[in-house]
Amino acid sequence: MQAEETARQYRSIWLSDIHLGTRGCQADFLLDFLRHNESEYLYLVGDIVDGWRLRKSWYWPQSHNDVVQKILRRARKGAKVFLIPGNHDEAFREFIGLQFGGVAIQEDTVHVTADGRRLLVIHGDQFDAVVRYAKWLAHVGDTAYVLLLGINTGFNWVRRKLGFPYWSISAYLKHRTKKAVEFIGDFEKALADEARRRQVDGVICGHIHHAEMRDMDGVLYCNDGDWVESCTALVEHENGKLEIINWAEVIRARAAMKVAA
C-alpha cells in the first residue's frame, strides 16, 4: 500500500509487448513498475496478451492475472486507458471502437502531449512485411524466439541464485546481428514515413522489442520496448517531455543500494 501512496505521477505511460501468457513475460518486473508509477493516460500498445502462444499451450500464473487486475483498477480509478491491438493479440481487433472495463480498444490513436505535439500511437506490425505477407514464417520465427526466451529464463534463474542482476541474452544477440539491425532500421523508417503521411509530429509504437527515441528528419520516432527482454516503458512528464525508463536498471540500482546499506 505504501508503494501505491508514493508512486511517481506522470501525464502518460506507454507499455507494449508484455506477452502475458508466456513464460518469457517479466510480469513481476511490470507489477513493480505499476506500483511505483501512475499516470492520467495509459496506452497499451499491442501484444499485451500473447494469443499465439496461448492457443498452443495454456500458461497463466497469478502474476499475469495481477497485471490485468492492476490495469483494470487504473481504469476504475479514472485513468484514461487505451488498448491498441498487435499481431499477437489481434483477436482484440474484432472489438475496435468498444470499451471493456473502462479500457477503450482502438486500431490506433493520436495522443496530444502537454506541449502540443501530435503523436500517432500504433503497434507497428502493419509495417512488418513478414507479419503481413508471410504469417506462417512469423509463427516459425515466434517459435524459435520462444525457445530463446526459455533459455534466457533459465539463464537468469541461475544468475539470481548467484546474486547477479537480470540480463537478456535475446536482446544482446538481436542487437548484434546484422540482419536484425537492418530490420529495425527499416521498421523505424517505415513508421516515421507513416507519421509524415498522417501529418503528425511523431509516432509511438512497439512490436520490435527495441526501445528507442530519436528524431528522424523532423519526425519523432519512439518505441516503448517490451516486457520480455528489456523491461522498458515510455513516459510523458507533466510538461510534455518524453523519456524511456528501463525498469530492469531501476531494480538493479535499488538492489545495489540495499547491498551498500
Image: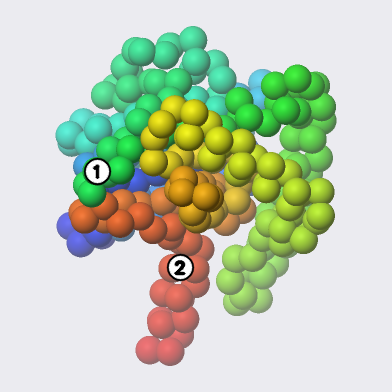
Q: Determine whether 208 is above or below 53 in the image.
A: below
> Which residue type does callout 2 highlight?
Ile
Residue 75 has which mark? Answer: none
For image coordinates 61% across by 36% down, the residue present is: 190
Up/down of 232 relative to 118, above or below: below
Q: Is residue 38 above or below residue 92?
A: below
Q: Position of residue 192 (x, y in %)?
A: 54, 40
Residue sitting at x 48%, y 61%: 246
- For the point 30% across and 43% down, the residue is 117
Question: Quadrant where the C terminus lies?
Answer: bottom left
Q: Nearer the viewer, mark 1 or mark 2?
A: 1
Distance Cα–Cα, label 1 vs label 2: 33 Å
Mark nearer the N terminus (1 vs 2): 1
Residue 24 left/right relative to 173: left
Which quadrant, please, contains the N terminus? bottom left
Query: Which kind of residue does numbered mark 1 sit on?
Result: Gly
